[in-house]
Amino acid sequence: MQTFGLFINGKWQETNEMMEVVDKTNQDVYAKVSKANENDVTSAVDAAECAFRYDLTTPYERYEILMNVANLLKERKEEIAKNITHEAGKPIKQARSEVDRSVETTLLSAEEAKRLSGEGVPVEAAPGSENRMAFTIRVPVGVVAAISPFNFPLNLVMHKIGPALAAGNTVVLKPASATPTTALILAKLFEEAGLPAGVLNVVTGKGSEIGKWLTKDERIQLFTFTGSAEVGLNIKQNTGMKKLVMELGNNSPVIVDHETDIKEAAQNIAAKSYAYAGQVCISVQRVYVDEKIRDDFESELLSAIKELNVGDPFDDQTDVGPMITVEEAKRAEEWIQEAKDKGAKILVGGTRNENFLEPTVVTNVTQEMKVVCEEVFAPIMSLISYSDLDECLNEVNQSDYGLQGGIFTNNINKAMKAARKMEVGGIMINDASQYRVDLMPYGGMKDSGWGKEGPKYSIKEMTEERLVVMNLK
């Protein structure tokens, strides 16, 4: 059994109280991690503030450190992927993909460390300023608090700390309680890569406690958080004028027009609804199908779902593994039952065994059912017919969320209409909502949050633009 301490000011510190991390497949205790108290959190912020004040790294040094981490991730890919599968229950082939993506995120962050720049401002064009010259520079904000979720315990951590460090900030990281060990392994890689003490600090423990201690610390200048809209709102209400980057909930809509390849769309949607048991912010949740092709699409979709392998996440063939906890699987099962009680029909799935929930398709749904209007975060898809695209888009936009969506169509006019009218941060044309590469701007609108991820875009959030004006004599 692995045991991990807190990582504060370049040192590993074990505490008297430990938390158990369970293997999500068999529920056995997989690791133990130290539980931070308020003094530990304060010490972590102390270390980050001190490191920032003394400006321990140059842009090129940050580039080299991040490149070293990328190489270490490549070398230890299989070890880290297996750790992700143990603590997150993510199928091993998807865990390996996450490590690959994390390498890419780290490389992108490294390159951006060398590209921090401002722009010229033509103040001399203003009357009376003929002798002046101006430009902007980008400066780091200071101490960043990063709070990461369970579903991507490596890559979403790197999306927070990679750009933060590249920009010259220091970080206090709080990983998800269900999946903390991957982040602690990553901290060891940064230590091995030569990151100075205090630049990255990792504290583990109960989210509500550590979150409260972090939000009341005035020295933290920016919070970057991925999680529920409810927790995001709480952070916003308790951080005053601090900068925030928030990636919150979603219930991704995907439209299937009759002018498309039905089989291709069905296979794409099936894969991108149930990957990691639907526990992805941009998993397909609401599928709106043109009634002209409803029966054909349903048949192709159910065939594609039958091809998915459900079971042991350590099996290379597995597509859908367990959910993160038995409690979450029960909650999803209750939502399915609620929909059935209100008249919905289950086309496939709906059966739970501990924290394994079968890929499920629900139809005859209404806008008020939880499986439609809330973020299901489980292997559940709702299938909805439409006859008019404008009416469909209006229904899509009734959601409180707006992270990503998609439309399958070979009609460019319909694609552009959806691009203009669908209220989302990103729309995928002839692809499902779950498409993401790590260099693109990623973020939502409405209750899905604000600010963008993607190293280039995160660095803009994690720096301040400072104007410099020179009066030339």
Image: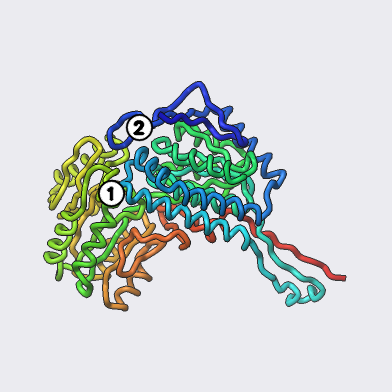
User: Where does the image place residue 108, in percent across and percent down from the top left?
Assistant: 52, 59
Residue 223 appears in view: yes
- The amino acid pointed to by label 1 is Asp
**Label 2, residues with CA under 10 Å away: few <14, some 14-19, many ≥20:** many
Quadrant of the image containing the C terminus: bottom right
As drawn, is 181 to the left or to the right of 118? left
Q: Residue 469 in the image: x percent, y percent?
A: 76, 65
Q: What residue is shown at x 17% (from left), y 60% (from top)?
A: 301
Out of 133 and 275, give the one closest to the viewer: 275
Secondary structure, mark 2, is strand
> On the picture, is 342 further left or further right than 67?
left
Residue 399: x, y in percent? 32, 56
Q: Is residue 117 above or below residue 238?
A: below
Q: Quadrant of the image for the N terminus? A: top left
Relative vertical location of residue 451 with respect to residue 337 in this rendering, above or below: below
Q: Residue at x 27, y 76 (%)?
A: 410
| Figure coloring | rainbow
Are the residues flagged by discs 1 and 2 in contact, CB closer than 8 Å?
Answer: no
Residue 425 in the image: above or below residue 324: below
Residue 316's disc is 1
Label number found at residue 150: none
Q: Which residue is mark 2?
A: 22
Relative side of 362 to 26, left or right: left
Name the residue nearer the viewer: 222 or 106.
106
Label 1 Cα crowd, 10 Å radius (few <14 / some 14-19 / many 20+): few
Q: Residue furthest right?
A: 473
Image: 50 above or below 461 = above
From this viewpoint, which residue is outermost toward the top?
A: 16
- Disc 2 residue type? Val
Which of pointers 1 and 2 lies earlier in the amino acid sequence?
2
How far apart are labels 1 and 2 at the CA level? 21 Å
Let me know if residue 229 appears in the view: no
